[in-house]
Image: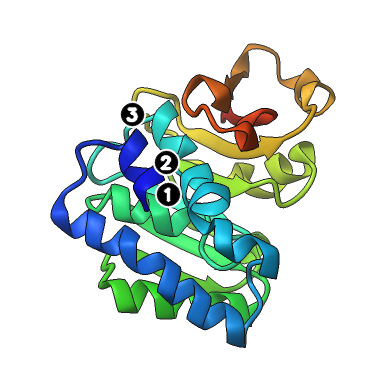
Amino acid sequence: MEIIEKYFTDLTEEQKSRFAQLQDLYTHWNSQINVISRKDIDSLYLHHVLHSLSIAKVIQFKAGTQIMDVGCGGGFPGIPLAILFPECNFYMVDSIGKKIKVVNEVAAALGLKNVKAEHTRVQQVKEKFDFIVSRAVTAFPKFVNMVRKNSSPKDKNSLANGILYIKGGDFQEEIAGYGDKVQLFDCTKFFEEDFFETKKVVHLEL
């Protein structure tokens, strides 16, 4: 939990409380439904919570922003972002039902009213959103093709509407075809831990 407060210094008491509850909640649910690798649960705040919040170092979502988290797994990046941006709405989808059960249970335990999670494939989702977020669920061009239809045309944030994708490793080849519509943000500019050495946030304007 300290690592979150290290990089986000103006959290409210409610936000601090919610972030602090994540370790026990995910430890409990992970013992029943494996959504985080066993070796990772001890590094929950570094590998999952802070990693998810790298998006918040790239953009401060304005109140009312509509965000879809695709392939959310047990709730990343959507749950940490929903805690940080309580006036934004998060629609979280995953094709694996038991993972959505964990998301719903965690959101309910935290009292997050701005999260809606459903067991569905993004191909079935018709609604439009300001941003579509994800943690590297598939090859980037494939992801773009799946969610392009869900991007709202009306911009209201500091970045143009589109995709915010958290990705590690070499990424140049996957984004080569998008020209000046794509931006890469290196996580080492925000966080000093070695874990972030190859991690990036990718923004693609849609």
Q: Quadrant of residue 174?
A: top right
Q: Mark 3 packing: few (<14 Cα in 10 Å), some, or many (20+)?
A: some
Residue projecting furthest to the right: 173
**Do labels 3 and 2 touch, CB within 8 Å?**
yes
Q: Secondary structure at mark 3?
A: loop
Are the two marked residues, 2 and 1, in contact with CB atoms closer than 8 angstroms?
A: yes
For image coordinates 56% across by 23% down, the residue present is 188
Residue 98 in the image: above or below residue 183: below
The structure residue drawn at horizontal position 62% and vertical position 81%, both measured from the top left corner, is: 97
Residue 130 image label = 2
Task: Rate crowding at label 2 as few (under 14), some (14 to 19) or many (20 or more) other CA atoms within 10 Å.
Answer: many
Q: Answer whether labels 3 and 1 touch (C-beta < 8 Å).
A: no
- Could you say where residue 68 lies in the image, as x and y percent from the top left? 48, 53
Nearest to N terminus: mark 2 or mark 1? 1
Q: Residue at x 60, y 75 (%)?
A: 99
- On-image quarter of the C terminus: top right
Per the model, the C-alpha gap separating discs 3 and 1 is 12 Å
CA–CA distance in space, label 3 to label 2:
9 Å
Residue 18, percent across and down?
Answer: 28, 63
Amino acid carrying label 1: it is: Ile
Q: Amino acid at mark 3?
A: Asn
- In the image as oriented, which residue stretches furthest toward the left? 13
User: Which residue is disc 3 drawn over?
Assistant: 157
Q: Which mark is residue 67?
A: 1
Residue sitting nearer the eye, 128 or 66? 66
Amino acid type, residue under disc 2 in the picture: Asp
Residue drawn at 31 percent across, 55 percent down = 83
Q: Earlier in the sequence, mark 3 or mark 2?
A: 2
